[in-house]
Amino acid sequence: MRGQNKWTGMVMGVVMGVLFSAAVVLAGSLEPSVGPTAAGSQMVTLEQIYSRINNGTAATKMSTFTEPSSGPTTGTMHTLDETYNLVGQRAPVPRTGQTPTLPLNPASAGSDGALQKGVAWPNPRFTDNNNGSVTDNLTGLIWLKNANCFGTKTWAVALADANNLANGNCGLIDGSTAGQWRMPNVRELHSLIDYAWGLPALSNAAGTGRWTPGNPFIGVQSDFYWSSTMVQLGPGFGVWVVSLVDGAMRYGNETVNTYYVWPVRGGQ
């Protein structure tokens, strides 16, 4: 019996050794790859995160962690919920497209191009999806690549054309169905404007120069485009339109005026 227990113990030892070795291999090294002072190991508090979101103050990198001697006093710190709610309340304004060298080189001190305020544009600004649509990497909106598929229409007809757009029309091979495309609201439409340029006020795919045909859109008109946003004018109503000439906005008569249509997908 003792011999049997001996062999049983040896077998169990071997098995445990194999399992431990496998666990080490699967888990990898338990040591951090870099120290706390490395760029990828910065430690920040919720208060620092809140401050960064609220006023743009960058957090100071923490190279060590010191246990606080006492708990926080009520009202001196922000909770995870407060930080999350702050993010949900903010709608950061993007930059206009003007730079220290465009359209004036150099930009005047204190001017928009010199200050560069707002959320920086991604590069590329636009991505051609090669299916008849283009994604704006700044807003996440998906635009019809052809900015002049329908010509000029009255507002009601333009709304219907945008709402009924689907795969197989206007160069689309994206599998979309009627109801997924729509007329953009005035803020969405205006988000396309690049104030560094005019005729049209639209950038190229990279976001670094003026739009040219196919880069990334086609059919862009230096003219007014309908939005889906109405405006009350005394006893009557109108509809906001945006000019691709220079980004100007005005209102149009929905039953009389005819403007271009630029459908969009997505949005929150």
Image (cartoon, rainbow, N blue to C red):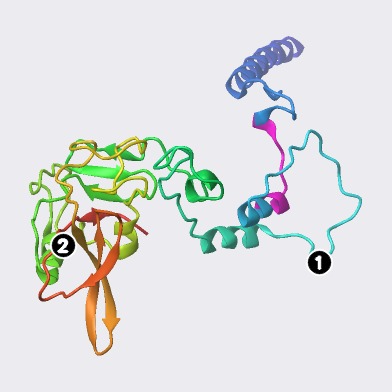
Q: Which residue is mark 1?
A: 74
Residue 22 is drawn in which quadrant? top right
- Disc number lying in front (2 or 1): 2
Disc 2 residue type (three-letter): Asn
Q: Which residues are magenta?
A: 40-49
**Helix, strand or loop at disc 2?**
helix
Q: Residue at x 37, y 36 (%)?
A: 208
Q: Residue at x 58, y 22 (%)?
A: 26
Contact (Cβ within 8 Å) of mark 2 with mark 1: no
Q: How many marks?
A: 2
Q: Which residue is mark 2?
A: 163
Q: Residues within 10 Å of mark 2 (few under 14, many from 20)?
A: some
Q: Nearer the viewer, residue 13 or 264?
A: 264
Q: Residues within 10 Å of mark 1 (few under 14, many from 20)?
A: few
Q: Quadrant of the C terminus?
A: bottom left
Whole-Å distance between the Cαs marked 2 and 1? 52 Å
Q: Which x, y percent locates residue 206?
A: 34, 35
Is 261 covered by the magenta stretch?
no
Disc 1 residue type (three-letter): Thr
Is 44 covered by the magenta stretch?
yes
Farthest residue to the bottom: give it: 235
